Image (cartoon, rainbow, N blue to C red):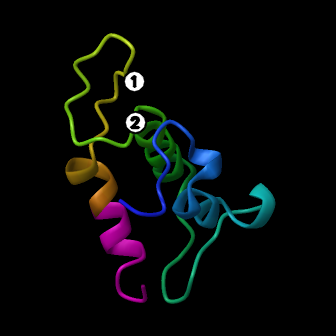
Amino acid sequence: MQGIKPHHPERSRYYTALIGFLGIGKGGMPPSKPLSNQQISLIKGWINQGAEESNCTSTICDTTNVTYSAVVASIFSNNCVSCH
């Protein structure tokens, strides 16, 4: 996925847009409200895990089992896709 740098949320265009300019506040584009801290944390965890579609079976993965299709895609779809 363009705009996502696996293992590097701080270098991922989409993640930095979500948290806002220079990490101050949370980005939100009308008509969507800013994402919740929990949603942002899930996306950050997914990127930190390598931004892969997996069930996180490795021992180094976050135990929340964040996958793109199960978690991240719905956040983007509900909050971003209508305008972007």
Q: Which residue, given by chain and number where applicable, does mark 1 sit on?
A: 62
Question: Which quadrant would residue 24 be assigned to in this image?
Answer: bottom right
* Rendered-image quadrant of the C terminus: bottom left
Which badge, 2 or 1, comes first in the chain's sequence?
2
Give x and y (percent) for residue 31.
49, 89
Number of numbered tags placed on the structure image: 2
> Residue shown at 52%/63% (left/top)?
14
Q: What element carries label 1?
A: loop
Q: Are marks 2 and 1 in contact (CB under 8 Å)?
A: no
Identify which amino acid the numbered label 1 is placed on: Asp
The residue carrying pointer 1 sits among few (fewer than 14), some (14 to 19) or many (20 or more) residues within 10 Å by Cα, namely some
**Residue sitting nearer the eye, 58 or 79:** 58
Determine whether, in the image, residue 78 is placed left or right of residue 18.
left
Span shown in magenta: 74-84
Give x and y (percent) for residue 61.
37, 21
The span from disc 2 to disc 1 (Cα, nearest Å) is 11 Å
Give x and y (percent) for residue 15.
56, 57
Above or below — where is 16 with respect to 53? below
Dot label at residue 82: none
> Residue shown at 19%/30% (left/top)?
55
Q: Which residue, given by chain and number where applicable, does mark 2 sit on?
A: 50
The reply to whether the magenta stretch includes residue 77 is yes
Identify which amino acid the numbered label 2 is placed on: Gly
Q: What element carries label 2?
A: loop
